[in-house]
Amino acid sequence: IRPDQSAKIAQAKQQVQKWLDDGMKVVFKGHSCKWHGTADYNIALSKQRASSLAQVCVTDVVDQANIKTFGVGNEELIAFENSIE
């Protein structure tokens, strides 16, 4: 997680905590790009990204059944630019 993302992370953490306090389940889904690495690498990278965000956002002790993390590699693009830039 980059330092320039701290404001967005703080907002996400606040929202995640509200959802958990309301008894909801929270899913963290990681993504990667299609420009670097193999499919296996990108799945592992996207899982790691989801887990990193979950660790930052869920600091209180909660029922782990209410938290799910997974990665989709580059199978679900979130940016549709067609170049490495």
Image: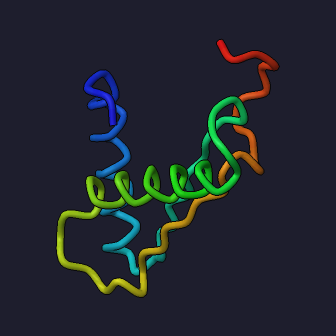
Question: Farthest residue toward the front?
Answer: 38
Residue 52 is left or right of residue 70, and the answer is: left
Q: Nearer the viewer, residue 42 or 28?
A: 42
The picture places residue 82, in percent across and down from the top left corner, at: 82, 19
Q: Quadrant of residue 78?
A: top right
Give the total number of marks visible in the rendering: 0
Question: Farthest residue toward the top?
Answer: 85
The picture places residue 45, in percent across and down from the top left corner, at: 51, 50
The residue at 31%/86% (across/down) is: 63
Please say which color scheme the image uses.
Answer: rainbow
The residue at 34%/63% (across/down) is: 18
The residue at 29%/30% (across/down) is: 7
Which quadrant is home to the N terminus?
A: top left
The residue at 61%/48% (across/down) is: 42
In this picture, is 7 found above or below 26? above
In this picture, is 36 found above or below 68? above
Question: Farthest residue toward the left?
Answer: 60
Which quadrant is home to the C terminus?
A: top right
Q: Nearer the viewer, residue 62 or 76?
A: 76
Residue 64 is left or right of residue 84, and the answer is: left
The picture places residue 43, in percent across and down from the top left corner, at: 61, 56
